[in-house]
Amino acid sequence: MGVERLMPAVVLLAFAVAWAVTRLCCRPGAWLYFLDHPNDRSLHARPTPRTGGVGVMAGVAAAALAVIAAGHAGRALSAALVGALALAALGLADDRAGLSARLRLLVQVLAAGAFLTVGGVAGGWAMAVLLLVGLVWMGNLYNFMDGSDGLAGGMAVFGFGAFAWAAAMGGEAGLAVLCAGVAAAAAGFLCFNFHPARIFMGDVGSVPLGFLAGALGVAGWRAGAWSLWFPLLVFAPFILDATATLLRRALRGEKVWQAHRTHYYQRMVQMGLGHRGTALRAYGLMAGCGAAAVVALTAGFSLQCIIITMCITVHFFVAYRIDRAWRRHRAGESPPP
């Protein structure tokens, strides 16, 4: 089947499977009905099921099988999918019973290392170590950013949608179809996760999605579909929020592994924008970064530098506005940004 016919079929398949499985996970009494109880990190007030990621990964698996059956999956894509499914299984066990941080980190490192070994890395050991750390960080930061209705699902829709667009432009059919399938699976889940959320993604979905963002970003770079800055710019709304928050807490001497509510998106919700308002504003930033990154791929070096600089500047401006509004909020003044 040609790519022109395969992509719409995979998109519909992934969306339908994710929608159906997520709907099933919403039902009380279902085998995969695990409740997330509010804690110090939570922005929700009542227990909510946290296995929506099962639906996402079911949709991703369906898309992957279709790509493999059509003969468009190479070694790198296959390794990325196996690693993501392994992390999904780990996340499901963690959502169900709780696992030690050391075990979770070990499996994440093994998944990232296996992907890089199978897919191959140019640039020697230094680049391999850098990519290994980046892949592990992507899985964890995506989990950190999955704390507000519609946020992580929306980032997957816009982020992997941009990947699919760029991969199609670069002639990487298998990568384009798979990324489109991941975006469609996230959209199927989002039908139940947009505010007011009936279900959360959980570790079973957030960690493997973050890993896939990094792994497929590396796969596209190795295949020549894009430069290494491209996936970083596409997922910049998540990368910059999570990384800046971690560094800020570390510099203050806070325990970075403890639950908290100081991410930029968390502060936006607490200042009165709510889950819906925060998600819609984030979608604008996500769509803008994705579109800008795709446009930059076709531009010359000078224009690429301008576009990347503009995107980073916008993020810093948004962060500055949120920081200023947060200080006013803490001091008892009103308005949100």
Image (cartoon, helix red, strand yellow):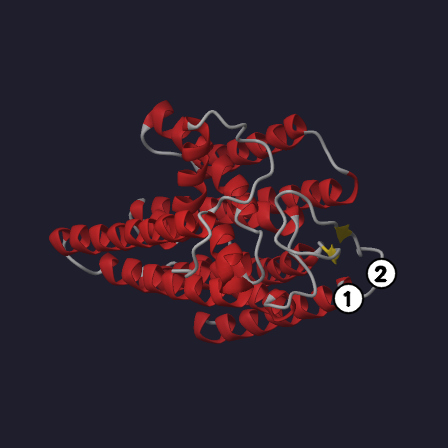
Specify whether residue 201 is in view: yes
Q: Is residue 244 left or right of residue 185?
A: left
| Percent position of residue 207, x then y | 58, 45
**Which residue appears farthest toward the right when viewing the image?**
29
**Which residue appears farthest toward the left when viewing the image?**
302
Real-space Cα separation, disc 1 to disc 2, in angstroms: 7 Å
Q: Quadrant of the C terminus?
A: bottom left
How many marks are shown on the rendered structure?
Answer: 2
- Residue plotted at (84% across, 63% down): 28
> In the image, which disc is placed on residue 24?
1
Name the secondary structure under disc 2.
loop
Front position in the image: 154 or 78: 154
- Residue plotted at (59% across, 33% down): 258
Q: Is residue 137 above or below residue 163?
A: above
Whichever of labels 1 and 2 marks the residue nearer the N terminus, that label is 1
Residue type at mark 1 is Leu
- Residue plotted at (46% across, 47% down): 330
